[in-house]
Image: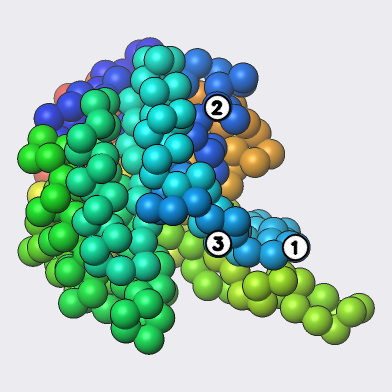
Amino acid sequence: MAADLRTRLGNFELPNPILTASGCAGGGREIAQFFDVSKIGAVVTKSVMLAPRAGRPTPRMAETPSGMLNSIGLQGPGIDAFLRRDLPWLLSRGARAVVSIAGSTVEEYAELAARLSDAAGVTAIEVNISCPNVEHRGQVFACDPAAAGAVTEAVRGRARYDIPVFAKLSPDVTDIVAIARACVLAGADGLSMINTLLGMAIDIDTMRPVLAGITGGLSGPAIRPVAVRCVWQVREALPDVPIIGMGGVRTGRDALEMILAGASMVSVGTTIFHDPSACMRVLRELDEELAQRGVERVADVVGLAHEPRAAARRRLTGNVL
Ligand SMILES: Cc1cc2nc3c(=O)[nH]c(=O)nc-3n(C[C@H](O)[C@H](O)[C@H](O)COP(=O)(O)O)c2cc1C
């Protein structure tokens, strides 16, 4: 690597800022046949719940222009199987594990955080708050500052002190900064954004919704400008809070755009489905993009797009701008 890509995640130092996005690489095994998973910053695992879940009926994926819709519905083995099987496997490969959790009540999230804190080797917890709150008429936690804050506070309260807690935000809100602020005030060490946008497709031949679950989460390049906007707005309001940026990242250029907007780490999701080694390619390309611009340390360009040109020039040593 030409540039210094080391990135801080709480007390940990990641070798580089490229991560998988939750739900797009399972527990890491799926992509390990394509590249060495210890070479990327971290594997963010699929959101795990307390109990095993079957997920939603099929069809649950649909291609859309520059993106896709999914309504997988948090299918998974539950926390016991995850701790017995998936986490030890990732650690045995030398990978860093960011564990994504999901629940339907605040207590479920707290319980998951406690269970993960008893296990060794969890680099960070990412809290997927884009789930319906069964105790509050099914309202999605991520769409309400009080609920988002309540989950974050409960997780932070039960997670071991040295495990960073990142709240993962939904773009389907009027004011993402309000949700971000609520999570940070509740103790989040960082924020991940964005989760998928709620979308829908109708098959005009059958005249029925394409997905069995009717609506689904839109992801892929189509959502990248929305993701960049969200990262930008939150960085502008909360400049000291670390951000894992994601949404449609396909190339090293896309990753650099996300970093310039304010992300210090970048997750790659949908792209993995057609290019399983995408994380390694994005990492290589990001390194090349930085080298071409004379950037020595990736940390130097995090949020750089917010700074006036002259200040940005001073921050960099090379002849970049
Ligand atoms: C098939 C699929 C499954 C996903 N599962 C999860 C999940 O379990 N937990 C979660 O927080 N996000 C999940 N996501 C959202 C991604 O982590 C990511 O936030 C989103 O897709 C935007 O990034 P991308 O455009 O690079 O995919 C899923 C996305 C897809 C496409």
Question: In 3D space, how far apart are the residues under numbered discs 2 and 1 (Cα atoms)?
Answer: 24 Å
* Quadrant that contains the C terminus: top left
Residue 30 percent across, percent down from the top left: 59, 30
Dot 3 or dot 1: first in sequence order is 1
Question: In 3D space, how far apart are the residues under numbered discs 2 and 3 (Cα atoms)?
Answer: 20 Å
- Badge 2: residue crowd in 10 Å (few <14, some 14–19, many ≥20): some
Question: In 3D space, how far apart are the residues under numbered discs 3 and 1 (Cα atoms)?
Answer: 12 Å
- Looking at the image, which residue is at 65% across and 72% down? 213
Residue 75 percent across, percent down from the top left: 55, 53
Q: Secondary structure at mark 2?
A: helix
- Badge 1: residue crowd in 10 Å (few <14, some 14–19, many ≥20): some
- Looking at the image, which residue is at 68% across and 39% down? 274
> Which kind of residue does numbered mark 1 sit on?
Pro
- Looking at the image, which residue is at 61% across and 20% down? 34
Q: Which mark is residue 78?
A: none
Q: Which residue is mark 3?
A: 73
